[in-house]
Amino acid sequence: MKKRVFAALLTLALALTLLPVPADALGAFADVADVTTARNVEVLRLMGVVIGDGDGRFRPNGKLTRAEFCKMTIELRGSGSEVVRYRSRTIFPDVRTSHWACGYINLATTPEGENKPGLMHGFPDGSFRPDQEISYGEAVTVLMRTLGWSDADSGGIWPQGYLDLGKANGLTKGLTLSGGAAITRAQAAQLFVNALSAKTKDGGTLRTLGSETVLLSVDLAKGTMRTSDGKDPKMVTPMLSNVLNGLKGRVVYNSNEEAISFLPSVTAGVIAGEAPQDAAVIVSADGSTAGFNELTGGAHNYLIFRNGSRVSANALKKNDVAIYSAANNAVLVCNTRVNVYYEDFMPSREAPLTITVLDGTELPVLPMAQQSIAGFLPGQEMTLLLTADGQVAGAVENGSNDTRANAVGYVDEKGKVIMFCGGSTITLNYSDSEHAGQVVRISQSRDPSLGGSAKKVYLIPEKSSLYGVVDVTAGTYSDRKLAENVLVLKDGEMTTLASLGVSRIAANEVIYARSNEQGEIDLLVLGMRESNLIYGRAKFELVGGEWEWKEGYGTKGPKIEGKTGYYTSGEPKTEENWNWVSPYGDYERKIDGVNGNYIAGYTVEVDCGPRGTKGKYRTTFAGNPDEARTGDFVELRSIIDTEDTQLYFAVKLDKITGVTKTSWMGTTSVTAGGKTYQISPYTPCWNADTESWFTSVEKAVSYGGKMNLYVKDGEVLIIEVTGR
């Protein structure tokens, strides 16, 4: 059997990682409102890494301090028993022996041997600043050091070296933050759980992990975990864990081979612990739930999610495909349909368990779909109806209005094609670097140009008609509402808005936005978008005036054959074959203000920054430099767009002055003029002293001096910095 290339096989819809469920089903903390965070926190609670506050809350959106992070790190690596030996001395003047975290901080900052500095460091002034919010870069650095990696391994560039090292090692999986951003407690929980499966410098893991099994329950009377492999390990501290029960994963052991926690099989926020669904229902009519009772086994009060977004039954459409998630009591509905060329099957054509389509991509076939697929022969074309977990629920002939193909995907920077399927994704065997960074419609059919049985995968770029800022706090994009549990793909990986850790996403970072039948945005693809608006630093050049004839004169005058001109002999009478005779048309005398006018002509070169490109654009507005001059930061607006000519008008961006280094909070937000702006890590920053671009926002902020923000519609598009 060919290699299966599913990115999310056996998965629930990604959106269920944000699914609100009753508080008593989310573990010990009543304020944890999504499944992924609940499970992460539960793993750490069993280990004693987190305990919550006195009110039984975890405060997932609260920021984490350096002292709190110290404590969690020491407990994660199992060194909590050593803390008592470090409580009686003062290393930092702002961490007295009376400070609750004194022992943890002293232990974390104590060198562990020759050439092995502590996990955390103080500041040049000798302080530790225990109550200062810890940054993402600091957090990743500490955990990579905990895993045995050193500054030398990171390449010496901080924090980017450690961030790159952490990404390659799986530590930052599911998180996308700038190095200077403060992290939330929920994001820290994701980091700590990732650290349990990330590789240490010597190739092992931080804690011993058992073989894969299913956690059935915790037996408090015996003090053991009941697991499906029958090993039932003894727990150091027996605690119930309803959130983790029933999940597939690995037991976490201490050095004495005692169980201290259970690590579910979770990747990038996608739950992978549930068995594949072997039953589905194809919706028979708009709004129909016929067959759902049998599908759910008679379960009541189930939720319905369509393409990852929570909906009512009224949103269901004919030929949608529904499966049931017992773990979440949710019906997952998918409307993904894709035209394919039938390549192969396994093990038989009459009862296939898998079929091969889309250039070698294997898809599993539900029993209910076998009969419909058996009606096709390899070499024929068909449309597949897919489930939310990437299985084939049915096959129909191409061209039906009720089953019209709609498959859409994203091509990552390496050309890998990722097809959206309900609330998950399928990674195709097919790749196409020509469309890297684009959202595309996906189909497959015969290629007539190659003849015979040759087939081809077609990728057609799909442009979003919407453009605007994502306001995470308000739950909006442009003027549209974000659907509950909107799906997010960033740089080719599924994630969640919560995991991004930002309150605002710049317009040029949204490659594609899809709206559902309710007009809500249910899918966001993030990266760097090619915008129809161009922003950058302008350089104007006068290229001479262009003449424009008035009506009735010159080339706009009447073509009278034999008088004002003639058509070339033997040629058809077309515009291209007309020849003027003196003194008409091109030969007519140009009298400015009488039969025409000279219009000042300019080209403007726009330098869009280190991530953008330089380009020359033609402008023809008289007096255009009065609006914008060389050195100004501008927006170019297209004013004429024909087959022959594209002209632009340059408009200066709004400028906010008086910004200093103290106006910044990390590198992700800045306050100016009484308003706080969220800053994208892609924002281009101009060094006015060297007349060159900074390579990152962090370097621009570190440079200090005076800053100007160039803004449009409340979004900072360019930052200008000068040390003078």
Image (cartoon, rainbow, N blue to C red):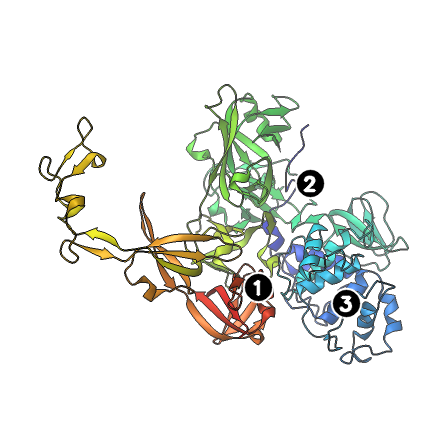
Q: Residue at x 81, y 46 (%)?
A: 227
Rounded to the nearest whole Å, what is the CA distance between mark 1 and mark 2? 45 Å
Residue topped by disc 3:
120
Q: Can you name the residue that lies furthest to the left here?
A: 563
The residue nearer to you, when weighing 690 against 187, is 690
Give residue 166's position: percent from left, percent from top.
71, 55
Q: Secondary structure at mark 3?
A: loop
Q: Nearer the viewer, residue 418 or 202?
A: 202
Nearer the observer: mark 1 or 2; the answer is: 1
Of label 1 and label 3, which has the lower sequence position? 3
**Neighbours of disc 1 within 10 Å: few (<14), some (14-19), many (20+):** many
For image coordinates 56% across by 60% down, the residue present is 681
Query: For this view, does 383 lie left or right of residue 177?
Result: left
Residue 319 at x, y percent in the picture: 49, 36
Task: Using the numbered discs, state the Cα–Cα distance from disc 3 to disc 2 in whole angstroms.
Answer: 42 Å
Give the residue pinned by disc 1: 697
**For this view, does 83 lie left or right of residue 151?**
right
Q: Which residue position holds label 2?
A: 275
| Label 2 CA crowd tier, 10 Å (few <14, some 14–19, many 20+) | few
Give neighbour class at mark 3: few <14, some 14-19, many 20+ (Cα, 10 Å). many
Q: Position of residue 8 (x, y in %)?
A: 63, 42
Give the residue type at disc 1: Val
Residue type beneath disc 3: Met
Residue 563 is left or right of residue 641, and the answer is left
Contact flag, marks 1 and 3 (Cβ < 8 Å): no
| CA gap, disc 1 and disc 3 | 25 Å
Estimate the x, y position of residue 316 in percent, counting from the top left.
48, 44
